[in-house]
Amino acid sequence: MKSKTILLLLSLLFIFCFSIAVFGKDTGKSEMILGGGSKGNIAFPHGSHQQTITDCTSCHNLFPQETGSIDKLKNEGGIKKKQVMKQCQKCHREMKRAGEKTGPTKCSGCHDKSLTR
Protein backbone atom coordinates (compact mmCIF):
# COMPACT_ATOMS: atom_id res chain seq x y z
CA MET A 1 0.00 0.00 0.00
CA LYS A 2 2.77 2.41 0.94
CA SER A 3 4.70 1.73 -2.28
CA LYS A 4 1.55 2.39 -4.35
CA THR A 5 1.13 5.77 -2.66
CA ILE A 6 4.76 6.68 -3.30
CA LEU A 7 4.46 5.56 -6.92
CA LEU A 8 1.29 7.64 -7.35
CA LEU A 9 2.97 10.73 -5.84
CA LEU A 10 6.04 10.29 -8.03
CA SER A 11 3.82 9.95 -11.10
CA LEU A 12 1.94 13.14 -10.22
CA LEU A 13 5.23 14.95 -9.64
CA PHE A 14 6.50 13.78 -13.04
CA ILE A 15 3.32 14.96 -14.78
CA PHE A 16 3.55 18.34 -13.03
CA CYS A 17 7.21 18.85 -14.00
CA PHE A 18 6.57 17.71 -17.57
CA SER A 19 3.64 20.15 -17.87
CA ILE A 20 5.79 23.06 -16.71
CA ALA A 21 8.57 22.12 -19.13
CA VAL A 22 6.23 21.88 -22.09
CA PHE A 23 3.59 24.52 -21.41
CA GLY A 24 5.47 26.93 -19.16
CA LYS A 25 8.00 27.98 -21.81
CA ASP A 26 8.55 31.73 -22.04
CA THR A 27 7.57 32.71 -25.56
CA GLY A 28 8.32 36.42 -25.21
CA LYS A 29 5.98 39.37 -25.39
CA SER A 30 3.18 39.35 -27.93
CA GLU A 31 4.01 42.93 -28.98
CA MET A 32 7.52 44.41 -29.13
CA ILE A 33 9.16 47.64 -30.21
CA LEU A 34 12.36 47.00 -32.15
CA GLY A 35 15.07 49.51 -33.00
CA GLY A 36 14.67 50.61 -36.58
CA GLY A 37 17.40 53.17 -37.03
CA SER A 38 16.89 56.60 -38.57
CA LYS A 39 13.64 55.61 -40.32
CA GLY A 40 11.96 54.96 -36.95
CA ASN A 41 11.35 52.06 -34.62
CA ILE A 42 9.22 49.06 -35.50
CA ALA A 43 6.07 47.83 -33.78
CA PHE A 44 6.65 44.10 -34.09
CA PRO A 45 3.62 41.81 -33.62
CA HIS A 46 5.57 38.88 -32.17
CA GLY A 47 2.45 36.95 -31.16
CA SER A 48 0.96 36.92 -34.66
CA HIS A 49 4.33 35.85 -36.09
CA GLN A 50 4.42 32.96 -33.60
CA GLN A 51 0.99 31.83 -34.78
CA THR A 52 1.91 32.10 -38.47
CA ILE A 53 5.49 30.82 -38.30
CA THR A 54 5.45 27.95 -35.84
CA ASP A 55 9.19 27.24 -36.17
CA CYS A 56 10.97 29.82 -34.01
CA THR A 57 14.31 29.07 -35.68
CA SER A 58 12.99 30.69 -38.87
CA CYS A 59 13.89 34.01 -37.26
CA HIS A 60 15.91 33.02 -34.23
CA ASN A 61 18.62 31.37 -36.29
CA LEU A 62 20.06 34.91 -36.57
CA PHE A 63 19.70 35.99 -32.95
CA PRO A 64 18.94 34.40 -29.56
CA GLN A 65 15.54 34.55 -27.92
CA GLU A 66 16.56 37.29 -25.47
CA THR A 67 15.43 40.86 -24.99
CA GLY A 68 17.79 43.24 -26.76
CA SER A 69 19.68 40.51 -28.60
CA ILE A 70 19.34 42.13 -32.04
CA ASP A 71 20.77 45.48 -30.90
CA LYS A 72 23.50 43.72 -28.92
CA LEU A 73 24.60 41.65 -31.92
CA LYS A 74 24.55 44.70 -34.21
CA ASN A 75 26.75 46.63 -31.77
CA GLU A 76 29.17 43.72 -31.42
CA GLY A 77 29.31 43.06 -35.17
CA GLY A 78 27.61 39.66 -34.82
CA ILE A 79 25.03 40.54 -37.45
CA LYS A 80 25.04 43.14 -40.20
CA LYS A 81 23.03 46.34 -39.79
CA LYS A 82 20.08 45.37 -42.02
CA GLN A 83 20.38 41.59 -41.86
CA VAL A 84 17.25 41.03 -39.75
CA MET A 85 15.24 43.48 -41.85
CA LYS A 86 16.25 41.70 -45.05
CA GLN A 87 15.15 38.37 -43.61
CA CYS A 88 11.76 39.87 -42.68
CA GLN A 89 11.35 41.42 -46.13
CA LYS A 90 12.28 38.16 -47.85
CA CYS A 91 9.64 36.22 -45.94
CA HIS A 92 6.95 38.88 -46.46
CA ARG A 93 7.69 39.10 -50.19
CA GLU A 94 7.66 35.31 -50.62
CA MET A 95 4.27 35.13 -48.90
CA LYS A 96 2.94 37.98 -51.04
CA ARG A 97 4.08 36.24 -54.25
CA ALA A 98 2.36 33.06 -53.06
CA GLY A 99 -0.86 35.03 -52.61
CA GLU A 100 -0.83 34.63 -48.83
CA LYS A 101 -1.73 37.30 -46.30
CA THR A 102 1.49 38.90 -45.13
CA GLY A 103 3.03 41.88 -43.41
CA PRO A 104 4.37 45.02 -45.06
CA THR A 105 7.02 44.93 -47.76
CA LYS A 106 7.86 48.65 -47.87
CA CYS A 107 9.87 50.69 -45.36
CA SER A 108 6.97 52.83 -44.15
CA GLY A 109 4.93 49.70 -43.40
CA CYS A 110 7.19 48.83 -40.47
CA HIS A 111 9.21 51.90 -39.51
CA ASP A 112 7.45 54.60 -37.48
CA LYS A 113 9.34 57.64 -36.16
CA SER A 114 6.69 58.22 -33.47
CA LEU A 115 7.52 54.93 -31.72
CA THR A 116 9.91 54.96 -28.78
CA ARG A 117 11.36 52.09 -26.81
Image (spheres, grey):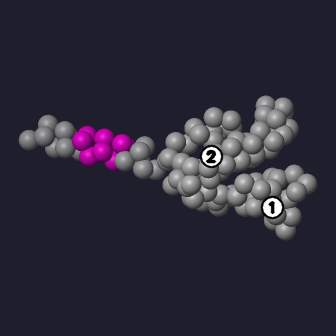
Q: Position of residue 3 (x, y in %)?
A: 14, 37
- In the picture, the quarter occupied by the C terminus is bottom right
21 magenta-colored: no
Question: What amino acid type should be assigned to the residue bearing mark 2?
Answer: Glu
Q: Earlier in the sequence, mark 2 or mark 1?
A: 2
Most foreground residue, 79 or 15: 79
Main secondary structure found in the magenta portion = helix
The residue stretch that appears in magenta: 10-18
Q: Which residue is mark 1?
A: 108
Name the mark nearer the viewer: 2 or 1: 2
Residue at the spot 24% in from the left edge and 41% down from the top edge = 11
**Can the viewer see residue 29 in this picture?**
no
Question: What amino acid type should be assigned to the residue bearing mark 1?
Answer: Ser
Label 1 residue SS: helix
Q: Verify CB contact (< 8 Å) between mark 2 and mark 1.
A: no
86 shown above or below 52:
above
- In the picture, the quarter occupied by the N terminus is top left
Number of the label disc, if any, that sits on residue 94: 2
